[in-house]
Image: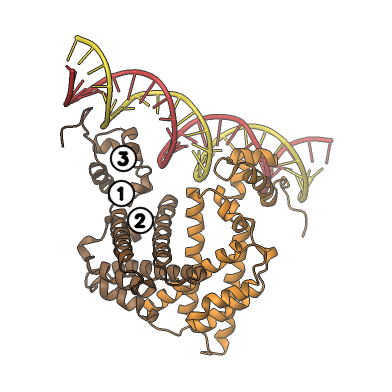
Chain colours: A orange, B brown, C yellow, D red
DNA sequence: ACTATTATTAGACCCGATCTAATAAATCGG
DNA sequence: CCGATTTATTAGATCGGGTCTAATAATAGT
């Protein structure tokens, strides 16, 4: 890659996040202003918004990449299935994929945001943005079920996706809450999904 | 009630809400400011915040009373049960109570907020506050299950509550989306809860 | 009339978010 | 080495939601 023209970047999401998490731990999410974060990282408020659309987006940075990985896995599966039509997809396969994905998720991979979720005051914009992520998961599942072709009933699809989302989210939060000594996340999720099979 | 001392009220939640919904329908939730709402109703911005803690709270006014009624029903049941110890409560009874409650809920009772939910731009604070309501439902169900004594396993309780919440919310939204010609809400909810029994 | 009480209000403040225009730091072509 | 171009950073204005304080208005009781 030839060197790009224009002024080179000095700021980065990582630098801003580092400063932010430090400040969050001291004073909490709410009382840490974007101004403070930017200044601590050595930049201006305006630069912050060049990297993040909102204060909450910074908070969810790692969580979003995790969600992105899951999305890729699901979409990859669907495309792979395009060739060999109509194999066993549908709800059962979706749950199976979630379990596979959960194997790659260990205690060391918990996003800071989720790790410290309960400690933070439930700020409005955090609830909003967190809810947005949950809805995104729900949409992903619904899309998968729809595109996978099985289950023509849209209502049943919606219910299936909603239940799966709810169980996944409570499993994640419960698992994190369990602290050290929690077993593998896969085991936890298996137990949570038990009643569905 | 003897007449209370002090300056009598002229403003009311209803007056403010009336003005607000009119403006929402014209320009949408986002681009209607609290200032506009208050002035249209004939009051000042400051008065608005004497009645509502946030712009979103006005939006959910009727929905909140609905949730309140459900809470009362659940708590009433628990207290009634105090006397005759250990009858059949638990998950099955909770689902039954939801169905009973749903019988009292007809097309005419849909809160404006829910009726127009899909039409409104998904404003951040609306998502946040909506999510807050969903979490409240979840908490209510969890509390009921806990206090009802059955099911000693906290994890299973959490899962049960989450699934119930998810199914209830998707049932409500789906039912509203179905438009005129949707059957009774009770029928819809029965169908949604079917897989659980 | 005076006091206590409550409702309404103006106005300041903070913060998140959006936008525009200015400036800084680099590459590239001469 | 110089200017044009490109991109990053920034200052600063503006808006709206939310909080707060202090002032004023309208009632009841004495």
Helix, strand or loop at mark 2: loop
Query: Which residue occupies the foreground of this view, A136 or A102?
Result: A102
Q: Are marks 1 and 2 in contact (CB under 8 Å)?
A: yes
The mark lying in front, picked from 3 and 2, is: 3
Query: Which residue occupies the foreground of this view, B166 or D1?
Result: B166
Dot 1: few (<14), some (14–19), or many (≥20) neighbours within 10 Å?
some
Helix, strand or loop at mark 1: helix
Residue sitting at 34 percent across and 66 percent down? B173
Give the vertical position of A85 relative to B46 (above or below).
below
Tell me the number on the disc at residue B24.
Answer: 1
Q: CA distance from mark 3 to mark 2?
A: 23 Å
Comes first in the chain, label 3 or label 1 = 1
Give the vertical position of A130 relative to A149 (above or below).
above
Helix, strand or loop at mark 3: helix
The x, y position of residue A149, in whole percent, is: 46, 84
The x, y position of residue A96, in whole percent, is: 57, 81
Q: Which residue is mark 2?
A: B120
| Badge 3 and badge 1 both on one subunit | yes
Q: Is residue A75 visible from the viewing direction of this image?
A: no
Q: CA distance from mark 3 to mark 1?
A: 18 Å
| Badge 3 and badge 2 both on one subunit | yes
Dot 2: few (<14), some (14–19), or many (≥20) neighbours within 10 Å?
some
Q: Tell me the quarter of the image containing the N terminus of chain B.
A: top left
The x, y position of residue B46, in whole percent, is: 34, 33
Q: Which residue is mark 3?
A: B51
Which image quadrant for residue B98?
A: bottom left
The mark lying in front, picked from 3 and 1, is: 3
Q: Are marks 3 and 1 in contact (CB under 8 Å)?
A: no
Q: Tell me the quarter of the image containing the C terminus of chain B.
A: bottom left
Q: CA distance from mark 1 to mark 2?
A: 9 Å
């Amino acid at each position: 890659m030839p060197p790009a023209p224009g002024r080179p970047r000095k700021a980065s999401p990582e630098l801003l996040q580092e400063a932010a998490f430090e400040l969050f731990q001291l004073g909490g999410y709410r009382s840490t202003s974007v101004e403070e974060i930017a200044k601590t990282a050595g930049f201006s408020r305006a630069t912050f918004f060049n990297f993040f659309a909102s204060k909450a987006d910074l908070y969810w940075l790692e969580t979003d990449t995790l969600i992105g990985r899951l999305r890729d896995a699901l979409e990859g599966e669907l495309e792979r299935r395009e060739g060999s039509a109509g194999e066993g997809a549908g709800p059962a396969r979706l749950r199976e994929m979630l379990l596979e994905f959960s194997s790659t998720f260990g205690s060391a991979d918990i996003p800071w945001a989720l790790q410290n979720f309960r400690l933070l005051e439930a700020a409005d914009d955090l609830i909003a943005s967190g809810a947005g992520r949950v809805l995104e998961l729900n949409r992903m599942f619904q899309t998968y079920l729809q595109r996978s072709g099985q289950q023509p009933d849209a209502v049943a699809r919606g219910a299936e996706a909603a239940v799966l989302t709810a169980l996944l989210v409570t499993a994640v939060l419960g698992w994190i809450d369990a602290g050290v000594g929690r077993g593998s996340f896969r085991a936890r999720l298996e137990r949570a999904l038990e009643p569905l099979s």
